[in-house]
Image: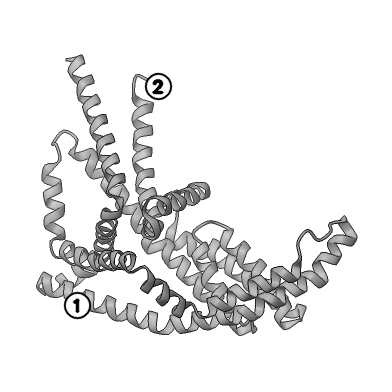
Amino acid sequence: METEKRWNKCIILISILIVAGGLYLLSPVLTPFLVGVLLAYLVDPLVTKLDELHLPRLLSVIIVFLGLFLGLGIIITLLVPLIEKQFVTLTVVIPNIISWIQKSILPWLLSHFGIDEVIDVNDLKATIAENWMKAGGSLSWLWKTAMSSGLRILEWGVRLLLIPVVTFYLLRDWSKVLNSIHELLPRRIEPTVVRLVKECDQVLSGFFRGQLLVMLSLGVFYSIGLTLIGLPIGLLIGLIVGLLAIIPYLGATVGILTASIATYVQLGDFSHVLMVWALFAVGQSTESMFLTPKLVGGRIGLHPVAVIFSVLTGGYLFGFFGVLLALPVAAVIMVWMRFLHQQYRESYLYR
């Protein structure tokens, strides 16, 4: 009996390793399907709300899809031109910042710490300005790159087209898929698996309906605030702060440093820098005292180091889509790790 249990554990472990290896090898193919599953999970509550109005499931899915595509189209139409203008403005701001560093910061470092110039700032300024001028025409560059690597773009296009297709069919049959998986569970472990799945659902809802709202709120707040202060690249810095807000303190640190330097160099007035500091003080206070406690709470439970590691690992294994999937997957893994830790504490190995 004891030997049989050990063999069963070995078989389970080997099966897990085989599945993990297969997932890694098939990662380029699996990415659209994983994104589709994630989108179906996110959108299903909206479809369920429409189902409660006694609409056919298929019609509910079509309505939600049309609404999402319309909203996405409006956002892209409004944001892309604004962001491109910000990059063009950045081609002017960066040389000014480098000149300020050369004329103010480097002499101060030299006089106080004896740090001499180790690089030719003029060459650096010329190089960065040239590259950012190229970035100003990013859309034309992207088009030329796309045309020169047609096979790669075709592959990306197929992946992108697969995502809405997979999402559509999963949404249509979401309840059937969940019921089928539930019926396959061994009765002996069903309660444990159901409990873990509910915990994963709480963690994911805490992330998507919490952390992403925090990031969006901060991005909008800082973009509007910095623009009203008069910073030419306020929208771009605000968006960056919102994206980096996923890692505690990193977004605010990067934002206040870049915004302060850019504001002082562009506007030449320290009073505007004080306004930037006041803006970030209000933003951070609002985030720590209201947004994060109310919208997120402690449901995600990822350490900042784990966040960084997850994003880097996801990007390495699955590329851009891996970065998008990294944190929700890591949060689910943390739920299972806590369960395994509890099982270990209760096992004979620990005692």
Q: Position of residue 167 (x, y in %)?
A: 21, 64
Number of other residues with Cα within 10 Å of mark 2, as a class: few under 14, some 14 to 19, many 20 or more: few
Q: How is the image coloured?
A: one colour
Left or right of 89: which side holds 30?
Answer: left
Q: How many marks can you see?
A: 2
Label 1 SS: helix
Q: Quadrant of the N terminus?
A: top left
Left or right of 161: which side holds 209?
Answer: right
Q: Amino acid at mark 2?
A: Tyr
Rendered image: mark on residue 63? 1
- Specify the quadrant of the image occupied by residue 344: top left
The answer to whether any part of residue 220 appears in the image is: yes
Q: Nearer the viewer, mark 2 or mark 1?
A: 1
Up/down of 351 relative to 266, above or below: above
The answer to whether any part of residue 45 appears in the image is: no
The residue at which mark 2 appears reads as: 350
Judge by depth and name the residue closer to the eye, 111 or 182.
111
Sequence-wise first label, 2 or 1? 1
